[in-house]
Amino acid sequence: MRPGRGERGRFAPRVVGIGLLGITALAAGHALLAALLGEPNRGFLTTAVLAGGTGALLVRLGSAQGEPSRRETLLSVMLLWLVIPIAGLFPYLLDGGLPWADAAFESMSGFTATGATMLDAARFDAFGRSLFLWRALSQWIGGIGIVVLFLAVFPQLAIAGRQLFSAEAPGPSEERLTPRLRNTAGAVLLVYLGLSSACLMAYLATGMPPFDALIHAFTTVAAGGFSPEARSFETLPAATQWVATAFMLFAAVNFALQYRALSGRPSALLRDPEFRTYISIVAAASAVAIWMLWPAFGDDAPRHALFQVVSIITTTGYATTDFAAWDPSAQVALILVMFVGGSAGSAAGGIKVVRLLIIARHTAREVRRTLHPRAVLPVRIGTRTVPDEVLRAVSAFLTLYLAVFATLTAILAVSGADFVTAFTAAIGTLGNIGPGLGEVGPMGSYAGFPDAIKVLLTFAMYLGRLEVVAVFVIFTFDWWKVPRGWRVAAWERLRARPSRGRPD
Amino acid sequence: MTVARRRGRGRFAPRVVGIGLLGVATAAALFALAALVADERFAGFVAASAAAGLVGATAFAAGRARSEPSRRESLLAVLLLWIAVPAFSAIPYAVDGSMPPLDALFEAMSAFTTTGATVLVDFGSFGRTLFLWRALGQWIGGIGIIVLFIAVFPHLAIAGRQLFLAEAPGPDEDRITPRLRHTAGAVLSVYVGLTVACLLGYLATGMSAFDATAHALTTLAAGGFSPEARSFEAFGAGPQWVAIVFMTFAGANFALQYRALAGRPRLLLGDAEFRAYLAIGLAASAALTVLILPDHEPVAALRHALFQSLSILTTTGYASLDFEAWGGRAQAVLVALMLVGGSAGSAAGGIKVVRLLIAGRNTAREVRLALHPRAVLPVRVGRRVVPDEVLRAVTAFLTLYLTLALVTVGVLILYGADHLTAVTASLATLGNVGPGLGAVGPMENFASLAEPAKAALVFAMYAGRLEVVTVFVVFTADWWKLPRARRGPSAPRRRGRGSAA
């Protein structure tokens, strides 16, 4: 540990700095594009300058040497998802004319791949193409960022049961994707890029203009849901809607498994319990929705039902019709899948299918234990036995998630929102879905809330994206007990040197 | 294990149900007499008495008491008891109250589970005897569930109940009494004592003898049935204050209250659950007072706020005014309280304060473990360390409870209820609260719901009262694997194997 000591506390600045430099490059590109298109670019330039300056400073301050501690890894993840959305809000603020709270919300909604928007019909008209591209790209980057984060970083941190999902493969290490972090990330990135380009081609083939196809491809594969159209997919042809349904479906499937399936082992995907459950839930919910939509839509019911169920369960948030105006009986299926979310290892948000699977098996076991209290009944997912600490972590995650959801709903209701708007806005943001029902329906926007509530919902998106538990760590005492190495490095080095002989 | 003892197997449940039904038959016979004297309809009571008597006597004869019933038998007895008693006590509502069968069952289930949700539209169609029958159903159901959970379920260790058994912070000597009978007796004496005190309180504040009796019976049971269509709005401030006080007692652990009365008040006042329960009640009342202050006099606002938060928190379900007319903000507080419920060891329903405490502490620990994964951090409630199996049981209970709530909401919406009605009706029945909001508000009733929705809510009341997990045992494969001894012919072969069970 000794040699690395001086480097302590410098991992997070490094990571955030690199992230900011990336945003700088992106913003500079957009500034150029906006200039070419004759659109305002003050915001992009502001972002580029601010992010560039801060990023360069942080990269110099930080250091990527040695193994970061859990605290440092957590801190960098938390800061990254906070600093980048802040850096990315200036284009909305200066070029799009949104107020502060709205711009922050829109930016967070982008980088968390939520898709909840502050844009009402009038604001849609005021936005230029460069802004729409920025919005879509933020989702695409946020999407791959979260997948890499969860596949490569969080499994080691063992948060909210993530340690289980890291090695979904049914065997020992040789079955794992790749032993090294970098390779895992590379494989996943490959799938992500492949899906994005395939989606782009398919949109183009169904007659979408290139710009729209690009933007929609970005936000489809990220399970994001931003669309440059105020009416989302409503005005687009049926074929395009079917393409979106197919790619949304894949966007919420574990990318690591997709990589394995594509590299010649489709059984890895087809036998995966999470994938099977995911498909069954989609099928069941769609069946109920089709049944309930038939009176209103007739032959179009299957298309709308399937599209909407997939859009909500994958936490994308596109809409082919205004489902907020559906009959409540048809909305049941959508409300239920809002609490499901996609698969672990994808860009989708929500509780995640595998967690629900674990919790269901766990509950079933407890019910059986009522009859046979001393029976030894392992909880299995596929062929793997779920360890007790994962069960505990998953139950705690679920409790915390639902508690946050209930608290958000209560605050929204007390602030004056009606009941349906309150609870769907809460789950829509916490679950990174985007639209809800009532005022925040797919054709509405979140612009009607007071500023304080907008800030709260921005935080909800952040919480949901980082899987709640990771963020609540900062509310524990332990977090604030700063370890020794974190004190000012130079002073620490001076102080520590004489006592080197002392045993630890 | 002797042959004689083994032959008693599978006959415990009929015995228990038989005793329960004979009780129903006796009560119904008395009510028939009372109705005759009061010149009200009594055919239903006679029918209930005859039917319950007949089936009860048969079951009693077929059954056999056992000192140590197996888990399966205890569970079966409880599950059947809470179906059989409501089924037979529904007859008077159907015959004398002219209700359709499903409505009568709903009313009877709502009574025996101390829910307080009603399908009664025209309160004038019920005679005094019927109202008293309803109230008594809640009172019996209330003490039944307390005795059940204090004396029977702790042995069964269901949904974390094993922790609540010995709420006292020490080993055996601190338990109320070591024997089941004594525990039940102690709790019963507190229950009866509080009921009498409540009755006197109502009489002293000017209620008529009939109203005071009917309300005292449903207050202590945390039930909430009232012979008045407008519930406590029909009475003045005096009775409402009395109700506030006794609802507070009704939602606290009766075993601890016994200990407090027996000279050790510290056990109650120092109890983590009791403190949390009071804190939640007071915080909610304070919030409500502020929220409804614009519409009421300050003292009246405080009274209504206290009354309504305790009524919902203790899952009683009385209303001192139509809280349907309150704004969405005040209602949000009430909906949140519906999810909490009273204390373990009381007749209150809901999730229960102690379970939320445990789940909260457990979650906080997991958050800390995210930073220090190898730290050993025990979960404590009060001074006691919560064992791992209790933690597991509590989280599984919560999951099952919330899942059932969600499914019930889905069923209600599918059958035409609006969102608010569906959510609150589901929480109010599963939590044994009573009224919800929307179409099932405190001055409304559940009669307008579709038949399948009513059936779903009857099941929700039943499942909620028996703490969900208990009911779902029936859906496991193990439940249906009958133990060998019940098959008869194979019994002698097991002779040499000792106490294999």
Image (cartoon, coloured by chain):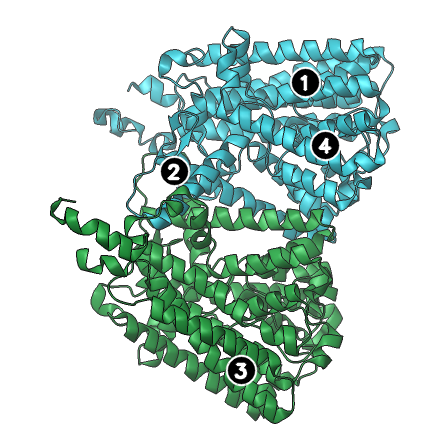
Q: Are marks 4 and 3 in contact (CB under 8 Å)?
A: no
Q: Nearer the viewer, mark 2 or mark 3?
A: 3
- Residue at x 50%, y 31% (from the top left corner): B354
Give the residue number, with chain letter if any, for mark 3: A217
- The image quadrant of residue B162 is top left
Image depth: mark 4 or mark 3 in front: 3
Mark in the foreground, 1 or 2: 1
Distance CA(mark 4)–CA(mark 2): 33 Å
Image colour for chain A is: green
Q: Residue at x 35, y 80 (%)?
A: A262
Q: Quick one: label 2, few (<14), some, or many (20+) residues within 10 Å?
A: many
Residue in front for this viewpoint, A270 or B307 = B307
Q: Chain of mark 4?
A: B
Q: Are marks 3 and 1 on the same chain?
A: no
Q: Which residue is mark 2?
A: A369
**Residue farthest along the left direction in this orientation:** A501
Residues under labels 3 and 1: Cα distance? 63 Å
- For the residues beneath circles 2 and 3, the answer to whether they share a chain is yes
Q: Chain of mark 3?
A: A
Q: Mark 1 against mark 4, which lies toward the viewer?
A: 1
> What x and y, as percent, mark residue A104?
60, 66
Residue B6 visible in the picture:
yes
Give the colour chain B carries in the figure: cyan
Cα gap from disc 1 to disc 4, whole angstroms: 24 Å
- Marks 1/2 in contact by CB < 8 Å: the verdict is no
Q: Nearer the viewer, residue B376 or B409?
A: B376
Q: Earlier in the sequence, mark 2 or mark 3?
A: 3
Name the residue that disc number 4 marks: B107
What numbered label is drawn on residue B246? 1
Disc 2 is placed on an element classified as helix
